Structure formats: structure tokens, C-alpha cells
């Protein structure tokens, strides 16, 4: 279930950037990745670039201080699949901030030296961003898969953000230049398994309609009652098959509109007499 969050909003004015506040409905990135890990390659690259852009705007809109709590809990996925940084000073976000302060989160996304406040050149945020890239690459079920070149570029970004490669970035402008380019959107083309499931759902739906029509005809023509009962059993079996297909679609779908429509169709079947 989506919740309301107070987030940061950035307004660009030429080379300058101004920070403001906003309130959006959405879910944390960690919850979204756990519940809907399926992503297309283009969507993953867009999100990685969007996170880096938000942190870069944060640095440019303030006095250069680090965000410091950059992790999958502090990134909010909106209803439109946009990404926003959580407002760390908003009282209504206190419960989320408490989760971010747990040892498990800090151990993974904050180096001990940064936890003590010793950081320069945005090293704390760069380190956390590298860990977020690792987290998303590990959790996302990307279809189609990233190309070899894209994976190589992302591994290089991780190494230079976390310092594992020796040479570090000094700001997020360098990160944005190093990230893989966003591939052009491909014209609507069936997506293998998901399209197949949708075709199955359509076929099962037509079969249910046909059975219902036959039941009505049997009733009107006063034909065998046993035959009508057999058709009712078949309808129940088809409805269960359709519910199973919708469950599989929900696991793969990432579009909020599609998810809502699938849930509505599923509810209609579950409420049917």
C-alpha cells in the first residue's frame, strides 16, 4: 500500500538549483524492489541516473553539504514511477528515518569513517550511491538483461564511488557523465512472458464467457441439467486459472496503471457469485 511522504523537490534555474518541499504518495525504493523486482533494462538505467541527478541537485541547491542518509529507504518511488529524496527534517518522516538508523542499514550504506562525520568531496554520498547501484543490480530482475558494456560501466561507477578501484569521483557531475546512456525507447513490442500471460488471460476470459453463454442457452432450451452443472464446474476451474495468471502478471508488472487494472480485474472475479 502506498503512503504519503514529505520529499524534496528541486527547481532548476539555468546553472542554479533551488530546493523546495513537496508531498507525494508512493513507496520506498527498498519496498518497491522487494515487491516488484521485475524491471526493463531502460527503466533500471533511468532510475540509476535519476538518483544521481537528485543527489547532485541536493548538493547544488544547498551549501554543498552531504545528504548523508542516502539509502533505499530515503528514496521514494512516486505513483508516476518518479524518484524523490525523503525530506529528513519532516516530522512525519520520523518512522522512516528511524529505520534508516538501524545497524543493518548503516553497516551497508555508511562507512564507519563517514558515520563519525569525517568526509570530504561528498565521499559519504558517493559511497552510499555506489552501494545503492550494487543493491539495485542485485535485486532487479532485468528483462532484457543489461549489455556487457553497460554492466562494465556500472561496475566502474561502483568502484569509483566506494573507493574500491582506488580512483574516486569528486562529485555527482562525474557520476552522471560515467553512467551508461539511456537506450532509446523501443516501439511497443510484445515482452515475451508478460505478453504470453496476457494472451492466456484473454483466452481464459473468452472461455469463461463461452461457458456462461452455453449455460444460459441450456437454461432457455431446458436441456440436460447435468450438462449445465458441468459447465458451472468448468467456469469455476477457468476462473481459478485466470486468478493464477493475474497473480503471475502482478509479480512481473512494474507499471502502476497496469498493476491497478490487473488488481481490479482480479477483484471482479473474486467477488463474482
Image: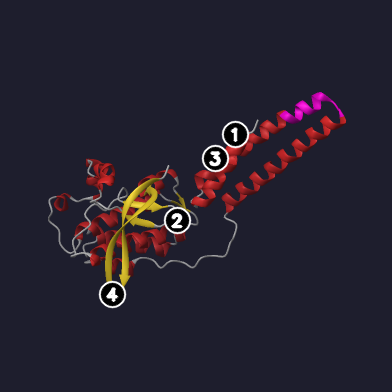
Look at the image and say whether residue 227 sits in the magenta stretch: yes
Mark 4: secondary structure: loop
Estimate the spatial distance between the alpha carbons at disc 2 and disc 3, rounded to whole Å.
Answer: 22 Å
Q: Given this view, does label 2 or label 3 mark the residue nearer the observer? A: 2
Determine if the magenta segment contains residue 119.
no
Which tag, 2 or 1, sits closer to the chain's start? 2
Count neighbours of disc 2 (C-alpha within 10 A) and say few if under 14, some if 14 to 19, many if 20 or more: few
Residue at (40% x, 50% y) in the render: 25
Compare marks 4 and 1 and give the one earlier in the sequence. 4
How far is disc 4 from disc 1 in space, using C-alphas? 54 Å
Q: CA distance from mark 3 to mark 4?
A: 47 Å
Measuring from the top left, give residue 192's x and y in whole percent.
58, 53
Which residue corresponds to mark 1? 270
Q: Considering the numbered disc 3 on the image, is that residue within a helix, a strand or a loop?
A: helix
> What residue range appears in magenta?
222-232
Q: Which residue is mark 4?
A: 15
**Could you say whether the residue bearing mark 1 is in a helix, strand or loop?**
helix
Q: Nearer the viewer, mark 3 or mark 1?
A: 1
Q: Are marks 2 and 4 in contact (CB under 8 Å)?
A: no
Can I make out residue 244 in this image? no
Q: Closer to the camera: disc 3 or disc 4?
A: 4
Q: Are marks 4 and 1 in contact (CB under 8 Å)?
A: no
Q: Quadrant of the C terminus?
A: top right
- As drawn, which residue projects farthest toward the bottom? 14
- Looking at the picture, tell me which residue is in the foreground, 106 or 5: 5
Residue for badge 2: 80
Tell me whether circle 3 and circle 1 mark residues in contact (CB < 8 Å): no
- Residue located beneath label 3 in the image: 247
Amino acid at each position: 500500500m502506498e503512503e504519503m511522504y514529505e520529499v524534496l523537490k528541486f527547481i532548476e534555474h539555468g546553472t542554479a538549483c533551488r530546493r523546495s518541499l513537496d508531498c507525494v504518495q508512493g513507496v520506498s525504493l527498498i519496498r518497491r524492489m522487494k515487491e516488484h523486482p521485475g524491471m526493463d533494462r531502460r527503466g533500471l538505467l533511468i532510475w540509476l541516473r535519476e538518483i544521481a541527478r537528485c543527489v547532485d541537485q541536493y548538493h547544488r541547491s544547498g551549501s554543498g553539504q552531504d545528504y548523508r542518509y542516502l539509502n533505499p529507504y530515503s528514496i521514494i518511488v512516486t505513483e508516476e514511477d518518479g524518484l524523490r529524496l525523503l525530506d529528513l527534517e519532516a516530522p512525519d518522516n520520523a518512522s522512516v528515518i528511524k529505520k534508516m538508523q538501524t545497524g543493518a542499514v548503516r553497516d551497508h550504506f555508511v562507512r564507519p569513517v563517514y558515520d563519525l562525520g569525517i568526509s570530504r568531496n561528498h565521499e559519504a554520498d558517493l559511497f552510499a550511491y555506489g552501494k545503492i547501484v550494487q543493491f539495485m543490480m542485485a535485486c532487479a530482475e532485468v528483462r532484457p538483461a543489461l549489455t556487457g558494456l553497460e554492466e562494465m560501466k556500472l561496475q566502474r561507477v561502483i568502484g569509483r564511488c566506494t573507493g574500491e578501484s582506488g580512483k574516486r569521483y569528486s562529485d555527482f557531475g562525474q557520476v552522471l557523465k560515467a553512467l551508461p546512456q539511456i537506450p532509446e525507447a523501443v516501439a511497443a513490442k510484445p515482452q515475451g512472458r508478460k505478453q504470453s500471460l496476457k494472451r492466456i488471460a484473454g483466452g481464459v476470459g473468452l472461455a469463461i464467457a463461452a461457458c456462461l453463454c452455453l449455460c444460459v442457452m441450456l437454461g432457455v432450451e431446458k436441456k440436460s441439467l447435468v450438462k449445465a452443472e458441468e459447465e458451472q464446474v468448468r467456469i469455476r476451474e477457468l476462473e481459478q486459472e485466470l486468478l493464477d495468471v493475474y497473480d503471475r502478471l502482478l509479480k512481473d508488472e512494474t507499471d502502476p496503471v497496469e498493476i491497478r487494472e490487473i488488481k481490479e480485474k482480479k477483484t471482479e472475479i473474486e467477488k463474482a457469485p
